Image (tube, rainbow, N blue to C red):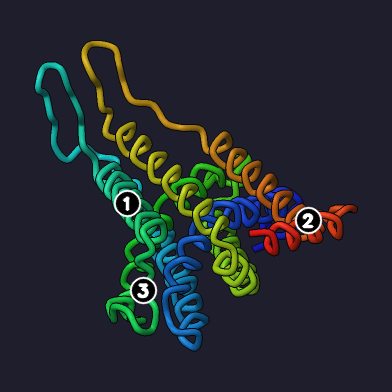
Amino acid sequence: MEILFTPNALMALLTLTFLEIILGIDNIVFLSIVSGKLKAEDQPKARRVGLLLAMVFRIILLFGITWVMGLKEVLFHVDWGFFEAGVTGQSLIIFGGGLFLLYKSVSEIHHKMEGEEEGTTGKASNSLSAAIIQIALLNIVFSFDSILTAIGMVSNAEPEQGGFGHAGALIIMILAVVISIVIMMIFAGPVSKFVNEHPTIQILGLSFLILIGVMLIAEGSHLAHFRFGANVEVGTIPKGYLYFSIFFSLFVEFLNLRMKKNRKPVKLHNNKIIDRKLKDEDVTN
């Protein structure tokens, strides 16, 4: 346990916690949109259950690191001449999650643009249980992707070799997950309220989920070694580029909201003269 209180371990815990929070932003956006269609009294419960599910799934996956890493083994090969692939368990989960995220994001944008909002007088399909099922399905994918990133960051080599050991690395990753989920629980309510009160933020958030869905599909294709022709292999989309574009877009949207809030209505200095002319024209007509 002494190694957990070393500067290297504390830095790894801080870095991994920050990364978990960043990777959890898309989870909070999805939670906000799904819970926003529920009754007001059910929304906090849906957010709490969703984030607790995220924590439970990630901890279970951390304890099953051997199983997670075993999913890299190829399940079956595909060779059609112009297309080759070696499909693994990891690629199936991440690719399927990306497709689900694309479908859900596009359908939500369609409902909002077409004015098909489901309220209390609309469809009853958006019950608490249905929302939790959607949240659970997506949490599996988000948790899987997050844990793969965490495993790559924290070395489980022995302390003599510059690592934290298997037990030390596991404790660091579990602590990072728990701390990040607690922080997200604290801010999930205000973030959800802000997202649901601003339609432009909702559309922006759904657009981010489309980006993340495309990223997951590309990552799943890369893990499955999708190859077209002789030399064209699908690569991954760097997450740094993706999250930079998300934060930059949010920054610009916040500036727009601030400008709209501070904008004063334009008043014409000669508005009395214009009003008088309009009244004279009405009398003449």
Looking at the rendered structure, the secondary structure element under dot 2 is: helix
Residue 132 relative to residue 32: left or right? left
How far, Cα to Cα, is label 1 from label 3?
25 Å
Considering only order in the chain, which callout, 2 or 1, is on the residue closer to the N terminus? 1
Q: Say which residue appears at 47% left-offset and 73% top-offset.
A: 36
Q: In this view, does 7 lie above or below 242?
A: below
Q: Mark 3 points at which residue?
A: 118
Q: Say which residue appears at 76% left-offset and 52% top-offset.
A: 259
Looking at the rendered structure, the secondary structure element under dot 1 is: helix
Residue 122 relative to residue 245: left or right? left
In this view of the protein, can residue 166 be seen by the observer? no
The quarter holding residue 21 reads bottom right
Q: Mark 2 points at which residue?
A: 277
Q: Say which residue appears at 56% left-offset and 43% top-offset.
A: 153
Q: In this view, does 43 lie above or below 140?
A: below
Choose mark 3 or mark 2, whichever is in front: 2
- For the N terminus, the quadrant is bottom right
Q: Which of 144 and 264 is in front in this view?
A: 264
In percent of width and height, residue 223 lies at 32, 35
In percent of width and height, residue 109 lies at 40, 55
How far, Cα to Cα, is label 1 from label 2?
64 Å
Label 2 sits on what residue type? Lys
- For the C terminus, the quadrant is bottom right
Q: Mark 1 points at which residue?
A: 97
Q: Say which residue appears at 32% left-offset and 56% top-offset.
A: 107
In percent of width and height, residue 98 lies at 34, 47
